[in-house]
Amino acid sequence: MSATTSPISVGVVGAGAVVSGVHLPVLKSMRDEVRVDYVADVSEGSVGRVGAAYQCRSVVLTDDVQQLPVTDVVLIATPVGVRLPYYELFATRGTAVFAEKPAVPTMSALSHLKAHYQPERFAVGFQRRTYASSFLVSRLISNGMLGTLRSIEVQEGALTTSTGGAQSFMTDMSLSGGGILMDLGCHGIDLACRLSRAEGSSTTSVEGVLDREVDREIGLAAKLDCMDGPVALHVSLSWLGSRPGTARFEFEHGSALVGAKPGSPVELLTVDGDSMGVFDPPPGPPLGANTVHQACYLVWRSFLDGLSGKSAPELTLESISPAVRLIEDAYADLRSRA
Amino acid sequence: MKKVAIVGANGQVGTELVLRMTEIPGITIVPIVRSESGSAFLRSHNVSCRHGTMTNRDEARELLADCDTILNLAHADSYIAKKRAVNTSVQLAINAAASPNSKIVFASTQMVYAPELPVRIPGTYGAEKLILEKKAARHARRMGKEFFVLRLGHVLGDFQAITRKIVREIESGPVPLVHGGAGPSNTTFVASLADALVRITSERVEAGTYDLLTSPQWSWARVYDFYADQEHLPLTIVPTPGPPTVASRMRSGVVGFATETVLKQRVRERLAFAMRWLPQGANEQLYARYQIRRASSEIAALNPAPVSVIEPWRAIGRNPIAVADPITSLAAFPLSEVRVAQSLEAEHRELP
């Protein structure tokens, strides 16, 4: 890390839609403290366009990962299946890493990374943790307004999906590491683990529809081990049917229903499911993110503050381990029966 | 057996259309999707799909060569010129790859008529479809192929977002509709699109541009009534007044009318649309700049700056009367201490 107050240099590996539409606009907005040195991708066309649009150097990725320029920090946003050489390279160089979700597919990969990176030097970009609605639910859990948290139900998915292009990495398990559970489910599972402050997790049952190896529909039941007792987790994900796109937190005396998008209100419901209205945030500045760019900024803010020692790191590898364990166990169960 | 290809079969309309056409005698439906991710839903319903990219002309020929009718439902929506250009290249590739006796159908929209705007110049989506209609028709004519344009209204159907919205509105109670829903709905059904395709494929329908709307045209009240009936839900329509007419707005003030008209014509959207004709690099740089500005303002909103209650005025006053400076005046004319104390103490007292 630079010892002076000059901007932190950032390299970006991967030039897909999330990088060009979310990370780069946010990083360029933080120009007093961050300087984007390069963008790298396997596609010469994509990286050339993104580099030119955001006026930073473009690098075409080859098998020789050493060619990547040295920077203080690197954002890795490639498919999870090809990340290992980059993780190893940056660990050797002492470069801090911000990894787009899902950072790792297995607990062994997680342990491997933990052995090579200090907690504050590796962040995982689970942006839903920063949503204003997540802070509100967290308050509901901690202030006991509706009693003790009993269970969490996550339902996400859509009837049809965009193809993501003919060469979409989602059809290649060696790149994606999984289907809907890995790509979409990891968000809701991580948030459930985070908000319930789960210290451990175990899968109770899993069902799914596999399309060759790719999971297109998943029903997962699990137990989260939390300080106030176990919390049941039910996850229903589908790319073959519609799901409401919500997380429902069931307490002793009612429940809270929240949408998966930033800016979603938190609706309070009675035990019978009748609406009690919206749980309003307190007056003043927003509690957290209400847009995608705000969420991206807040995860970068947290990462950079953790790096500089201004605050404790929050997006650590350790913090994602209950979610990684659940996802790995679910896949093992599903594939053993396929 | 006639083969009907649906390009972009994994979209909202395409999915329902394919499922409605799988068991039509004499017709084999051929859904075409770019990847297995996209075709998963159709394949889960035992519909086999072809996979490939239309922008690759060899691949397009392989996918379409044996098809008698080809419907293009694919559409990419973006301010990035390169992504929008895909719409043209897909349609031209279909024209080129279609066999000489096949019929090519381009799915366009009623938005080409700008039905929602006071001045009939189509918005971004309508303008793009209109341009592509003309370009693709000329291209097909040059190649001696039969070319059809179907301008679809709002598409209703079991998988369509607008249908779900209508049902939700009926479920949640009285439905406010302009003039009680008496006006034309400009809707069509996915089933009607299937009907049109079968007719184009099996009958002698002259090539050309057609509107695909409910026939006879349904009012909005009829549409809501249909879904209330289908879902066995009670329907109460609350009539609301329509928007003011052009004449009444003219009467209310020419400037106001012009401003409103310009705003309704979505000037910013049109300017963004015009960006597509800039050189690709400039287009993408402008879009990146817009994204950065947007991110900056959203980030700033997380820590809103305190707002001053004082409005900044320029110095005004032309003929000042000669008085002492305020400090001198305040010292010269103090408030009586006794009176101030009295006014603070006594809540109820008789005024002199």
Image: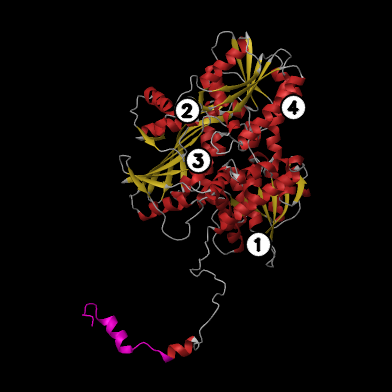
Q: Position of residue A136 (x, y in %)?
A: 43, 52
Q: Amino acid at mark 4?
A: Asn
Disc 2 from disc 4: Cα separation = 41 Å
Q: Amino acid at mark 2?
A: Pro
Which quadrant: the C terminus of chain A? top right
Tell me if mark 3 has few (under 14), some (14-19) or many (20+) residues whose alpha carbon lies within 10 angstroms of its own.
few
Q: Tag 1's secondary structure? A: loop
Asked if labels 1 and 3 touch by Cβ distance under 8 angstroms, the answer is no
Q: Which residue is mark 3?
A: B247
Q: Are marks 4 and 3 on the same chain?
A: yes
Chain of the residue where label 3 is placed in the rendered structure = B
Q: Are marks 2 and 4 on the same chain?
A: yes
Q: Quadrant of residue B23?
A: top right
Is any part of residue A52 visible from this angle?
Answer: yes
Disc 2 from disc 3: Cα separation = 21 Å
Q: Which residue is mark 2?
A: B184
For image coordinates 55% across by 74% down, the residue present is: B316
Q: Tag 3's secondary structure? A: helix
Sequence order check, earlier mark of 2 and 3: 2
Q: Amino acid at mark 1?
A: Glu
Q: Are marks 2 and 3 on the same chain?
A: yes
In this rendering, would B294 be left or right of A89?
A: left
Q: Which residue is mark 4?
A: B56
For image coordinates 70% across by 30% down, the residue present is: B88
